[in-house]
Structures are given as C-alpha cells and as structure tokens.
Amino acid sequence: MSESGDIEEMVERLRAGEVRALARAVSLVEDGSLVGMELVKACRQYAGDALRIGVTGPPGAGKSTLVDQMAKWLRQEGQTVGVVAVDPSSPYTGGALLGDRIRMQDLSGDAGVYVRSMASRGAKGGLAAAVEDVCVVMAAAGRQVILIETMGVGQDEVEVAGLADVTVLVLVPGMGDEVQSLKAGVMEVADVFVVNKSDREGAERVEAEILAMQGLAADEKERVAPVVRTVATSGAGVSELMAAVRGCAAERRGRKRWRKTSVDGLRLDHLGVAVRNIDAARSFYEALGIRVDHEETVEHEKVRTAMLPVGESRIELLEATEEDSVIGRFLAKRGEGLHHVAIRVDGVDAMFERLRSQGVRLASDEVRAGAGGHRYFFVHPSSTGGVLVEIVGDAAGWATGEGE
Ligand code: CO
C-alpha cells in the first residue's frame, strides 16, 4: 500500500476513535518524520472544535494531580479527554518517562482519557510546534478537551501555554514573595489562577498577592482572571475551576471577542451550491481531488448535504429531499448554482443581534442549528449585494453553552 494510502487509513482509524491508532499517530508526529508531518496535515481539517486547556505553574504546585482531577471531572460530564504532559527539561521522548508513571489510577482502563507525555527538548521546529501537532492529532481523534500540562515555568512552558484556548496558572502557599518574582510573561499568560493546596497555611496570602498584582495591571487588562482555590488531592474546588475555565472559553469564543476586535474569527466557511443530484455533481469535485468528508440530511430543512473540504473552507452541495423546500424552490426558480455564501464568526448570537440592530435585513428570525450541529442564520440578498449570506458560528458544544 502506498504511503498516502497508509495515511488515509490511519486518519480513518483515528476518527473512528481507535486508541491504538492514536498512540501510533502521536509517536509518528512526535518523531518529526515525514509521515508524521503528512499525518498532521491530513488531521487538520478534522481538528475543529476541541477545547485546549493549558495547565502550568512552578514545580511542586500539584499540577499533575490537578490535571487528573480535571480529566475525571470532564469524564463525568461525558467529555472525551486527551492529556499532553510536557517536560521540556527531559531529553527523553515517546512517553516512556512520564506516561508510565503512576497516575490516573481511577481512570486507567477508560478509553475516554488518553494520556501522552512529551519530553522533546530536541523537537524539530521547537517544543510548542510539536505539542501543537500532537493536539491536532488528538482533536482529529475526537478528543473534545485537551489538557496540556507543563512541568515548569520557563520560556518553553510559556510558549506551550500560549497554544491553549484557556491557560490555568497553578500556584501554592509557601511560595512567599515568589509570586512577584515569577517572570512577568508567566503571570500574563494566565486566564485563570489556581491556588492549589489551599488547605495549607498561607493560601490567603498567595491569593492576596495575585489580586494585588492584578490591581496593578488592571488598566491594561480588559479582563481580570478569576482566582480559584483547590485541593487537588481531594478534588475540592475542581468544579469551580472548571466553571471558571468554561466561562473563559465561552467568553473567548463568544461576544466579547468580536467586540474587542470586530473582525476576529471571520473567515469564508463554505459556499453552498444547489444541485439536483449530489451523486452526479460530486464527481467533478472528486476529479479535482476533493473528497466528500461529511454527508448529512437535515430533516427540518428538507435538504441532503455533502461537504467537500477545500483548504480551510468547504463547498457544500445541497440537494432537496422534497420539492416544497428552500432548495427545492430555488432549483425550480433559478436552476442549479450558487445558493449561498457562508461566513464564519466567533459569537453567532452576538452577530445576529448586531446585524439586526444595524438594520440589516435578515432572512432568519432566529439562530438555528443545522448540519453538524453548527448554528447559523441567513442574511437576505437585498442587504448583501444579491447573494444569500449564511452567518455560521461554532457547533453547539460546551464552550458555547452555559457560560454565555
Ligand atoms: Co450552508
């Protein structure tokens, strides 16, 4: 079998959730081999909505125990979890060093948690790039949340933390003035502060130091990172921590993000093409080398869809399942052709309100859920220069859930 055939097969097995395929894929990626690079490339289109949570802090802060508790909490919520434990100070790779350490005893045997250690000081293109690649593979394998745990607070760790959607900085009592002596870059990377081992003497002091430092920086930061107390060994405070993380993730992906920089997250998501018959129409695209990666019938729209990925975007073929439907009427009136242009935004609900308040004529009276669980609404062609525009946001997942 050819190498590309191997990669296709591996991606299929990954997406089917095979843990052994995931382990093999991560090894290939970590090696920095050509096959590994091809694999990451193939995985990228399936790596969409995984939430990455970085957990960093000085040695001895109890990060591993906390990460175990977070994984356990997520499993109870029904989420699948990937853990990347990163130790830049270690010269060893391949997970042998930390992967075998005694952790996650409650979770061993649970295929919903996959733990991988990385100790790749010599990684080509830098550690952060290697970790990012591993995250892509885990996300493509269907891991909904990826916990990235780093062992220390050096420059490598700050870079790795920067990969995460939400970064948790773990501190402990007994650090004294060390909170202040932590490198500025480390404090700034935190979206959520944790005072772990908070049953110990000095917890108030650590918290006070964090708050004092935040007070100094308050003018520059539009958002003050919450401080949560935990006792990782007992699991105390973990629910509060996850609520803070969830809130931060929702905020990131939600309305505040576009308020800050209104074009953030905007991109062409897909072109919707109305066709009489998907099976007939797809052969041209397949001749181009584009493969259908998702097919779905959306009952309430009376439409069958096939997604054809093109780089970061997609072409969406739309076939009516009934003549009396949006696509059915479009075909009868206009024939086959471009039906709509879809633009992705962060915070679809906020964008709906924003456009409505600015007098844009909308063709939907609310934000709805469509193929793949993605939420969307339509803007009338009379407002857009003659083409129906679909505004599409994130899938209805936990990052866009309660926190908003
Ligand atoms: Co569409």
Image: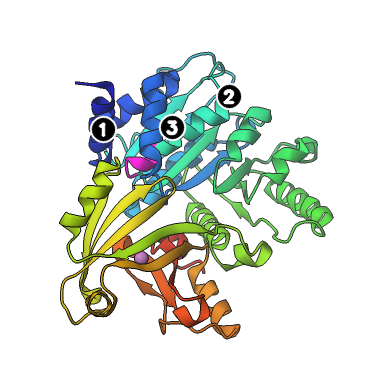
Disc ID at residue 134: 3
Q: Which residue is mark 1?
A: 8
Magenta stretch, main secondary structure class: helix
Q: Residue at x 54, y 59 (%)?
A: 266
Q: Residues within 10 Å of mark 2 (few under 14, many from 20)?
A: some
Span highlighted in magenta in the image:
137-142
Q: Is residue 51 left or right of residue 321?
A: right
- Cα distance in 3D space between marks 1 and 2: 27 Å
Amino acid bearing label 2: Gly
Of the residues under marks 3 and 2, which one precedes in the sequence? 2
Where residue 85 appears, as percent x and y from the top left, is 48, 30
Q: Does 176 sit left or right of 258 as displayed?
A: right
**Percent position of residue 398, x then y:** 42, 60
N-terminal label among 3 and 1:
1
Mark 3 residue element: helix
Residue 262 or 304: which is nearer the viewer?
304
Q: Which residue is mark 2?
A: 126
Q: Residue at x 68, y 41 (%)?
A: 173
